[in-house]
Amino acid sequence: MVKNRASFWRRNRWLWWLGGGLLAVAAVLAAWVAVVLHRIEPYLRAQMVEELRQHFHARVELDGFHVVLRNGLWAEGNGLRIWPPAEVEGVKVPGPASTGEPLIRLAEFRFHAPLHFEKGKPFHISVVELNGLDIHLPPRSHFDHAAPGSAEVKNEWPWGGLSLVSFRMDTVDCTGVRLILESSRPGKQPQQVAIAHLRLTGVAAGGAMGFDAQLTNPLPVGTVHTTGSFGPWLVSDPGESPVAGSYQFDHADLSDFNEIAGILSSDGQYTGTLRHLTVDGETDTPDFRLQPFNNPLPLHTHFHARVDGTNGDTWLEPVDATLGNSHFTAQGQIVRVTAAGKDGTLVSKGHDIALTVTVDRARLEDFMRLASRSATPILTGAVTANSTLHIPPGAQKVVERLRLNGRFHLDQARFASAAIQGKIEQLSLRGQGRPGDLKTANTADAAAIDSTMEGEFKMAGAVITLSSLEYRVPGAIIDLKGAYGVEGGTLGFTGTARLQATVSEMVGGWKGLLLKPADRFFKKNGAGTEVPIHIDGTRENPQFGVDFGKMSVSSPNQPGEKQR
């Protein structure tokens, strides 16, 4: 059997020669392909660089490019850098972009394409993988001085195809992406957006593409998942490339602002450009609170806003909000403030918040609880108000920086202090000439007094100042002015009490009869009795009294005596 096999190979030696020849041809072909690829790589690399240079009208550099034939064409590269258009002709524009920072910096890329293709049709690439992509967008002013001709190339996508071959891409997968947005303010630090993963679909020259991204919002820190469309890419100014989509923002910690606290979630839609977005959405913060009071309330908002992507500045137009059981609207701006540092560069001092607030249906206790260390507000009631709110940046606590200026109207006003509310009840009954009802009055009667309060207020340095306050209860009108310390709860108010009843009617009985001659001393400005009063002490221990010493005429009481 072995002899027959040996005889077969002796008789058919041509098979050896054929097999060896095929192996030799394969080796030669492999060597030839390797040589061709080695020699064509520089050509393909040059073609790619030239195409990108012409497209961006900019300086382009590519450190490495390698091609391998293995079940198709595999290509990979590294160190791609594309400078802004204004740099290509040697034009130096003042500002952040002229420091030599590339417009696009890509650490690595790779893709695979089959070798078979039809004439006149592009290679089909299912996925292009990019890693370490930085997109650095100079301010709009840079492109206003761009190199001649750069504005002529507009609605094109940079990977539209090369002059030697063209490609059609289904998906571009990007990891480690940073979007760096320069501000037009000299010396201001750029806004950076870190994108953990970005997937682009429907990539084609001159058109928009879909995207799906997960990114980290810089402030407040939180995870944003967003989908939408981007493009076409504007070579003349990439920051003006259109973008539209929807987003979900979860687990954002508001304590990053060092002024407020709570965990925020938000969703909505946006449209505009990379620099200027219009956003419509809503937020939920079940534990919103001001630092350091730590009295949380649920906050829900619907908002329409304009956002400057270069620095995060936001203009609210408006916000429709519900805090606890209170509804209000706010309109204004939240912008970053910078100042010159020791080395002369501008550094961020924080956010400046300036809003116009309209409270149309609300409970006063919601707002007072939010800005008080005590869970029990000093005053409750149904409130409407118009106010301006300003919180400048600074190292002080937010309550010390908070500025308010407005007017309010309060119905069903109730003091939390039983002592104060009891005094109000006594004042109302005496003012109506019903002193006999004081013996049967109780806490429920005091709480049921129909009262209103309105006035003008300001807040600065953690102190609320009321320049005019009118408090009405049945039988009496109290006009006050003074201040309330938000943190310490100190009270300091003076004014007048004007009552319907005369002094004798307020006292009643045989004592009232004895006081009838004194009625004429207290009648004034159409009131049966008008006396100066004061409220001082603290929120926990208020003091209410009549200042007879401030009366313009003498009275049966000793001058200067204070009745408490």
Image (cartoon, rainbow, N blue to C red):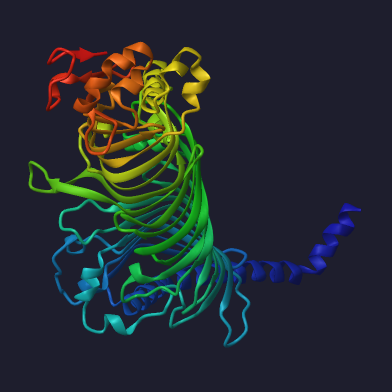
The residue lying toward the viewer, choosing from 456 and 243, is 456
Q: Which residue is drawn at 24% across and 14% down?
A: 563
* Residue 384 visible in the picture: yes
Tell me: 364 left or right of 395: right
| Residue at x-position 25% and y-position 49% | 336
- Locate residue 347, reporting x and y percent: 18, 45
Report if residue 535 is visible in the image. Answer: no
Residue at (20% x, 32% y) in the render: 461
Farthest residue, direction bottom: 120
Q: Vertical placement of 555 versus 118: above or below?
A: above
Which sits in the foreground, 485 or 49? 485
* Image coordinates for residue 260, horizontal then vertical, percent: 36, 35
Q: Give the residue drawn at x 19%, y 75%.
A: 145
Would you say 453 lies left or right of 439 here? Answer: left
Q: Nearer the viewer, residue 26 or 531?
A: 531
Residue 505 in the image: above or below residue 191 = above
From the viewer's side, name the closer residue of 190 and 521: 521
Circle count:
0
* Image location of residue 374, percent across then percent down: 39, 21
As drawn, 248 above or below 110: above
**Quadrant location, the C terminus:** top left
Residue 457 quadrant: top left
Instruction: Give the x, y percent position of residue 488.
Output: 26, 20
Above or below 482: residue 159: below
- List the single residue furthest toward the right: 1
